[in-house]
Image (spheres, helix red, strand yellow):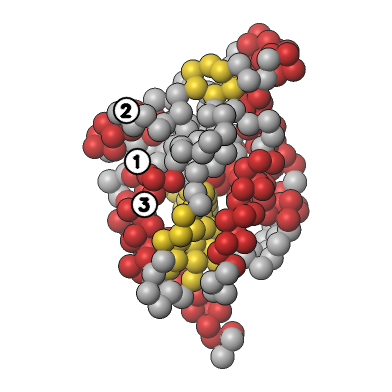
C-alpha cells in the first residue's frame, strides 16, 4: 500500500487498478490528484504487481474485497471525505465491497469501464472443462486473450505495456472462475448497493468489457445520485486514451461538486 499526499488536502481518493496491471501505472495520475488537493491511497492487488502472493492466482475474490477494506481503513486516518476509484476489475471490486459492507460513509464512487461483463467468453466445452479443473487443479494457469491493442489506442502506452514485465500474462483457472462468479453476484446483489453518489464512465469502443451489461447494471441501480457517461471512440483504458485530460477533468468536476456539498453541509 502506498500513500501519495497533497498539501492542504480536501479529500482522499482510494484508487483500485484493474486485472493484469499494478498500481505503478497510476503514479502519474496520483500526482495529478495531489496537485488538485487530494491524497491518494493505492496498492497492488493480491496476485498482481509486486505482491509476494502467487502471481495470477487467488483462492477467492474475497481476497480483493478484504484488501480494499484495508486501503479504505488507511484513507480514514486523514479524516477527510473519501472517494473510491475503480478501473475495470478494480471497479468490480469496489462494487462488490460496497454491496457486501453496505457502507454509506463513502462520499463518492468513480467507476471506469467496470468489469460487469466480459466480451471474450470461452466456448461451452472449454467452460465445462474449466469447472472440472477448478476443482482438481485450481492453480493451473493459462494465457489470457487480452492484448495491448485491445486496451487503448495510445501507441506510446501500448508500447510501454508490451515491454512491462510486471503485467500478468497468465491467470489461474480459479482466478477466472472467481472473476466470472463475482460479476454475476454484482448483478444479483445490486439492491444491496448503498445510496452513495456514483459516476460510471464507459468506453464506447471497449474491446474487453461488455458495455451492454455495464449499462444494464447502471440502469438497475436504485440510488439517488448516479451519472453515466460514455466516451465516444475510446477503448477500455479511458485514462490512457487521447481524451484523458477531458476525462480527468470530468472526474474532477464530480469530486469537486461533492466535496463542496460536504463543506456546505458541515458549515
Query: Which residue lies most toward the left here?
Result: 156
Q: How many marks?
A: 3
In percent of the image, x 57 and y 74: which residue is there? 79
Residue 225 lies left or right of residue 134; in this view the side is left
Mark 2 Cα-neighbour bin, 10 Å: few <14, some 14–19, many ≥20? few
Q: Position of residue 17 (x, y in %)?
A: 48, 45
Mark 3 Cα-neighbour bin, 10 Å: few <14, some 14–19, many ≥20? few
Q: Up-down: is 135 above or below 183? A: above
Q: Nearer the viewer, mark 1 or mark 2?
A: 2
The CA distance from mark 1 to mark 2 is 22 Å
Q: Earlier in the sequence, mark 1 or mark 3?
A: 3
Q: Up-down: is 151 above or below 266? A: above
Mark 3, residue position: 27
Mark 2, residue position: 162
In percent of the image, x 37 and y 44: which residue is there? 25
Q: Position of residue 122 (x, y in %)?
A: 58, 17
Frontmost residue, 3 versus 20: 3
In percent of the image, x 64 and y 54: which residue is there? 69
Residue 236 lies left or right of residue 132; in this view the side is left
The CA distance from mark 1 to mark 3 is 25 Å
Q: Secondary structure at mark 2?
A: helix
Mark 1, residue position: 233
| Image quadrant in which the C terminus is located | bottom right
Q: Earlier in the sequence, mark 1 or mark 2?
A: 2
Mark 1 Cα-neighbour bin, 10 Å: few <14, some 14–19, many ≥20? few
Frontmost residue, 264 versus 174: 174
Q: Up-down: is 239 above or below 222? A: above
Q: Quadrant of residue 104?
A: bottom right
Amino acid at each position: 500500500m502506498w500513500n501519495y499526499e497533497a498539501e492542504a488536502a480536501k479529500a482522499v481518493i482510494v484508487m483500485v487498478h484493474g486485472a493484469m496491471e499494478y498500481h505503478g501505472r497510476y503514479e502519474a495520475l496520483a500526482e495529478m490528484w495531489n496537485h488538485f488537493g487530494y491524497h491518494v491511497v493505492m496498492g497492488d492487488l493480491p496476485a498482481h504487481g509486486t505482491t509476494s502472493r502467487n502471481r495470477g492466482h487467488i483462492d477467492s475474490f474475497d481476497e480483493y474485497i478484504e484488501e480494499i477494506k484495508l486501503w479504505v481503513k488507511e484513507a480514514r486516518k486523514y479524516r477527510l471525505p473519501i472517494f473510491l476509484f475503480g478501473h475495470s476489475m478494480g471497479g468490480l471490486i469496489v462494487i462488490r465491497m460496497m454491496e457486501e459492507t453496505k457502507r454509506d460513509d463513502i462520499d463518492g464512487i468513480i467507476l471506469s469501464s467496470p468489469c460487469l461483463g466480459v466480451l471474450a467468453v470461452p466456448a461451452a466445452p472449454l467452460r465445462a472443462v474449466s469447472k472440472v479443473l477448478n476443482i482438481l487443479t485450481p492453480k493451473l494457469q493459462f494465457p489470457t486473450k487480452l492484448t495491448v491493442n485491445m486496451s487503448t489506442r495510445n501507441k506510446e502506452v501500448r508500447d510501454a505495456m508490451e515491454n512491462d514485465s510486471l503485467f500478468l500474462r497468465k491467470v489461474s483457472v480459479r482466478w477466472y472462475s472467481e472473476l466470472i462468479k463475482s460479476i454475476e453476484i454484482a448483478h444479483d446483489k445490486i439492491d444491496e448497493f448503498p445510496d452513495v453518489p456514483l459516476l460510471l464512465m464507459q468506453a464506447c469502443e471497449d474491446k474487453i468489457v461488455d458495455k451492454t451489461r455495464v449499462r444494464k447494471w447502471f440502469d438497475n441501480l436504485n440510488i439517488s445520485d448516479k451519472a453515466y457517461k460514455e466516451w465516444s471512440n475510446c477503448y477500455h483504458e479511458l485514462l490512457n486514451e487521447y481524451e484523458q485530460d477531458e476525462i480527468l477533468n470530468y472526474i474532477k468536476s464530480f469530486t469537486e461538486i461533492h466535496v463542496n456539498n460536504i463543506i456546505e453541509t458541515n458549515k
